[in-house]
Image (cartoon, grey):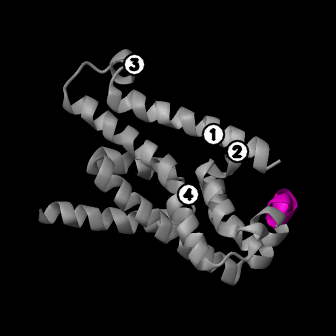
Amino acid sequence: NENFLLLSVSFFIFSVIWTLLLGFATPILLFAGFVFGKWWGILLVLTATTTGASLLYFLASLFFKDLIEKKLAPKFYKLKSIFQKNELLYFMIFRFIGGGGTPYNIQNILPVLFNMKVKNYILGTFFGSMPAMFITVSLGSGIEQVIEKNREISFFAVTSSPEIYLPILGFLIILLIAYIVRKNFFK
């Protein structure tokens, strides 16, 4: 469908710009799931946010490296030695656990401190962000499905729907894994 393709391309461009301008990821993730569904939504938003984050990383390392080091190095100095061991693996883990509570926009520029290779940054962002983003996109898709069924909208109706409680359960599992990983690897 021509309208769907136009909407998809427009959303992709908007998401790249949104990420590049340090926007929060959650609104576009929920929107992607709500409008495009679980599978097409995750493909679109994951590709777009990875593209936007990579552009941001490139521009930040090119123009703002000194400022980033001045502002962020004191807070994240412990991570530098960890990332130097295997930057791709540790960055994927860092993304997977949501940056240990670091906001998404800071996660996008933080690797400037570690002089990460752009290829590793792209791969780490794409694969590390995938599980948490998939859960949020699935949640948006689940909300759309509950509304589509014309069920009475109540807290119980929404939370008892498998389209909603399964992504929330997945989110809780990722939180538990993130807590364990953070406690053991990012002390």
Q: Which residue is mark 4?
A: 128
Q: Position of residue 164 (x, y in %)?
A: 38, 30
State yes or no: discs 4 and 2 in contact (Cβ < 8 Å): no
Which mark is drawn over residue 181? 2
Q: Which residue is mark 3?
A: 155
In the displayed structure, 73 sits above or below 155; it is below
Q: Earlier in the sequence, mark 4 or mark 3?
A: 4
Q: Position of residue 113 (x, y in %)?
A: 77, 71
Which mark is drawn over residue 177? 1
What separation in Å lies between label 1 and label 3 (alpha carbons)? 27 Å
- Residue visible at 22% across and 21% down in the picture: 151
SS of the residue at dot 4? Answer: helix
Q: Give the magenta-colored segment's residue range.
A: 71-80
Q: Quadrant of residue 107?
A: bottom right
In the displayed structure, 58 sits above or below 30; it is below
Q: Earlier in the sequence, mark 4 or mark 2?
A: 4
In the displayed structure, 105 sits above or below 134; it is below
The amino acid sitting under disc 3 is: Phe
The amino acid sitting under disc 4 is: Gly
